[in-house]
Amino acid sequence: MAILDGVKLRIGLTDTMQDVLLNELIDDATARVLAYINQDGIVNQTVPDAVAWVIKDIVVKMYNRIGDEGKQSGTEGNVSNTWEAIDLSKYADALDVYRESSQSRRPGMRFV
């Protein structure tokens, strides 16, 4: 199942009206994951299939926060909401196996 289809299933969308927005969120989440695993264009530009669920999870969180970006919590009447920050370290157990070691980077490229 494609990431877009998985996200739409999780948030209950059956039409294509939000596809442009969802694809933008998928691109952003993918970039975050690639940066985390040190594959942000230097070696590989694709997220390993085994961690596609991370992208879906992040996109659902991003979608659910639309209109409430920057808030940590909110209350309306008797309903209280708390949003967690999108922190990739939460997914470290799944992502760290794909992190590029510093020895595998191209010679001469060091970031300090």
Image: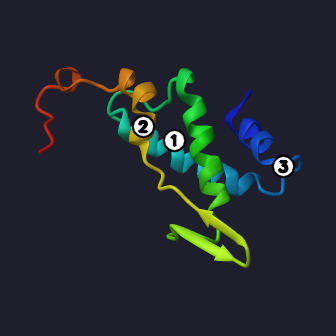
Kindly state the secondary structure of the residue where label 1 is placed: helix
Q: CB of mark 2 within 8 Å of CB of mark 1?
A: yes
Instruction: Assign the C terminus to one quadrant of the image.
Output: top left
Q: CA distance from mark 2 to mark 1?
A: 6 Å
* Residue 60 location (% of width, % of height): 65, 48
Find out whether the residues at labels 2 and 3 contact each other: C-beta distance under 8 Å. Answer: no
Q: Residues within 10 Å of mark 2 (few under 14, many from 20)?
A: many
The CA span between labels 2 and 3 is 27 Å
Q: Secondary structure at mark 3?
A: loop
Question: Label 1, label 3: how many angstroms apart (C-alpha)?
Answer: 21 Å
Q: Can I make out residue 65 in this image?
A: yes
Which residue type carries mark 1? Thr
Residue pictured at 69% horizontal, 57% vertical: 21
Front label number (1 vs 3): 3
| Residue appearing at x 60%, y 73% in the figure | 74
Looking at the image, is mark 1 or mark 3 earlier in the sequence?
3
Q: Which residue is mark 3?
A: 13
Q: In this figure, which residue is indicated by the disc labeled 1? A: 30
Q: Position of residue 39 (x, y in %)?
A: 37, 32
Which x, y percent locates residue 44? 41, 28
Q: Which residue corresponds to mark 2?
A: 34
Q: Amino acid at mark 3?
A: Leu
